[in-house]
Image (cartoon, rainbow, N blue to C red):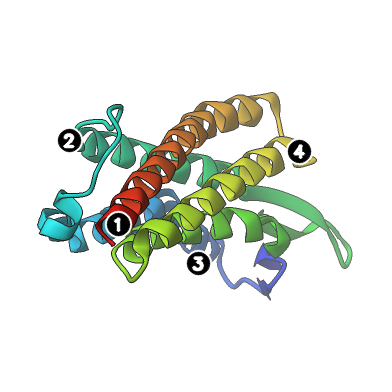
Amino acid sequence: MDCISDIFCYKHKSYKNTDLIVNMIYYGVLFLPFVVGMSIGSIYRNKWQEDKYRNLIKPDFYPPSYLFSIVWPLLYLMIGMIYSYSLYDNDCSPFGYSKCGKRQFFKNSKYWIIPILALIFNFSYTPVFFSKNGLFNGLIIIILSLFFAILTLIQFIMQRDFSRTKYIWAILALIPYIAWLSYASYLSYNIYILNDKKKNIII
């Protein structure tokens, strides 16, 4: 009996079939943040050139635009690495008469909830920012992204089977991400405040 996680088990006819499925999921998790994140960025890339957004008042400590195109690909790759590493289980438990009759390769579904929510909020920031009332709603979304990123780090560290190696990799991968989200939240807050004041002055 092979189980991809607690929600999908089957009797294997060949270990090769199981290995193929497991590898597809593993590398899917590894590259998904990068592919989705960069795709969203590419779709909305020209939006930044519109006068509405180009003329936003930005704080003095706002970084040059090229820095975002450097930082986010690296962060997405690091997120994919730690997700694929921490959500992969490769557990073997008794089943029937066999001491290793049931193999499980990924963690139970409950362990995926917080990391997936963290990614959903991250991916939704750009579409929300360019929607109606985007400055305020974008601020809310990025704060939620930061909150769930912190929860993800806590979960990865507190997982019962977490080895010292995974502990170190979780910190190395997610602390820069959390630090950048903290900085981005600070920027988003200041951009919202500055432009909200401008709107009130014009009115």
- The amino acid pointed to by label 3 is Asn
Distance CA(mark 1)–CA(mark 4): 46 Å
Kind of residue at badge 1: Lys
Comparing 87 with 124, the one in front is 124
Q: In this view, does 76 lie above or below 51?
A: above
Give the CA distance from mark 4 to mark 3: 32 Å
Residue 152: % across, % down: 62, 45
Residue underneath mark 2: 66
Q: Which of marks 4 and 2 is in front?
A: 2
| Residue 25 makes an appearance in the image | no
Q: Give whichever of discs 2 and 1 has the lower sequence position.
A: 2
Q: Where is residue 178 in the image (x, y as percent from the top left)?
A: 51, 36
Mark 3 lies on a secondary structure that is helix
> What is the three-letter code of the residue carrying label 2?
Tyr
Identify residue for label 1. 199
**Disc sitting over residue 158 in the figure:** 4
Task: Please report contact status of discs 1 and 4: CB closer than 8 Å, yes or no.
Answer: no
Question: Which part of the image, by quadrant, shows the N terminus?
Answer: bottom right
Front residue of 144 and 61: 61
Residue at position x 80%, y 40% from top? 160
Q: Earlier in the sequence, mark 3 or mark 1?
A: 3
| Residue 17: assigned label | 3
